[in-house]
Amino acid sequence: MITKFMTEISTKFNPFSPTARSARLFLSLLPPNARQTIQIKTTLLPRTSKEPSSLSVKFKDGKEMNLDCEKLGIKSLTEEVDRHSRKLQKQADLTDG
């Protein structure tokens, strides 16, 4: 996963819910030094909460992606985030020339 262009990651999930699996796995895929460059906010919901799991990613270009962890699996989440990261990488490569 290309994390170079991410500025903020916000997650909200019930750790005991099976639908929170993709949000937990997304956080586990981040590199160990991610907290140095990315602001990561994690909100753990109580066990009895019926609120859906969510993931929000902000990029350096100002784009914010709000992803539904209930409907998307981990593969879909990483593909969506990497799609925009690759676009930013191409732009950076073109400007560096």
Image (cartoon, rainbow, N blue to C red):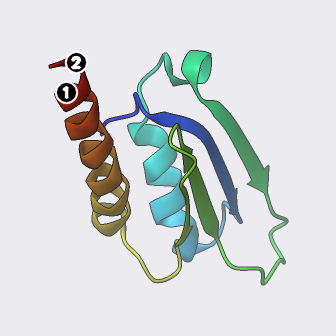
- Residue 93 at x, y percent in the picture: 19, 27
37 relative to 32 in the view: left or right: right
How packed mark 1 is, by other alpha carbons closer than 10 Å (few <14, some 14-19, many 20 or more), is: few
Residue at point 26%, 48% (across, down): 87
Q: Secondary structure at mark 2?
A: helix
- Residue underneath mark 2: 96
- Residue underneath mark 1: 93
> Taking 18 as reference, is 8 above or below it?
above
> Taking 56 as reference, is 86 above or below it?
above
State the residue in front, 87 or 97.
97
- Residue 3 at x, y percent in the picture: 40, 33
Residue at point 61%, 58% (across, down): 56
Q: Secondary structure at mark 1?
A: helix
73 relative to 26 in the view: left or right: left
14 relative to 29 in the view: left or right: right
State the residue in front, 62 or 51.
62
